[in-house]
Image (spheres, rainbow, N blue to C red):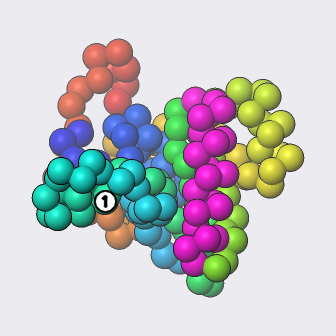
Amino acid sequence: MSRPPFPHMMERDVPLFAAFILSGDADLYTQWIFDLHVGFGQMPEPWHTPAQIIQLLELTRLRIDAVGLDGGYPTVFEVKPVAGLAAFGQIVGYRWWYKELNSLEPRAAIICEEIHPDVATLCNAFNVAIHRVKPATVEGIFQACQIVQADCSQLIVLPDLANPDL
């Protein structure tokens, strides 16, 4: 892929997010926001120019993979092939920052193919939904793009030598 159709998602995340969109679980979301920046970023050193400071602050802000809106009510999503403690920490942090900046606590969810059993226990304890999916095919990615109105025009799929069925 030259440019992911869902901004900010890594190449291995795209087929998982597409599979979620194609599942019945995503039907309740009527709008999607991708690459939502939260937090304030890391303060650059004072010798940077004002333009560099603005750029560096923006580049170091936290980024939520996706926010799904259900009647205006948000759910923040983290997408990872294998959800470990890092994914859990990210989604809990994103939920906190979203509430801090928007005065509304969103639901939180992780989309993954696999999840560490201890992390699944933490997700249950902290009210983080888990959506386990198998990666979508190339056709599925294009279908998902149409559903969420993402731009797939520059999506270039290179042959996956490890998986010749794609």
Res 112 quadrant in image: top right
Res 63 quadrant in image: bottom left
Q: Residue reaching furthest top?
A: 162
**Amino acid type, callout 1:** Glu
Q: Is residue 7 above or below residue 87?
A: below
Residue at 64% x, 60% y: name it.
95
Residue at 61% x, 71% y: name it.
100
Segment tinted magenta in the rendering = 82-102
Position in image of residue 66 (x %, y %)? 48, 59
Position in image of residue 47 (x %, y %)? 18, 50
Can see residue 28? no
Residue at 79% x, 28% y: name it.
118
Looking at the rendered structure, the secondary structure element under dot 1 is helix
Q: Residue reaching furthest bottom?
A: 71
Q: Is residue 101 inside the magenta stretch?
A: yes
In this view of the protein, which residue sits in the foreground, 79 or 102?
102
Q: Is residue 15 inside the magenta stretch?
A: no
Residue at 69% x, 64% y: name it.
107
Res 76 quadrant in image: bottom right
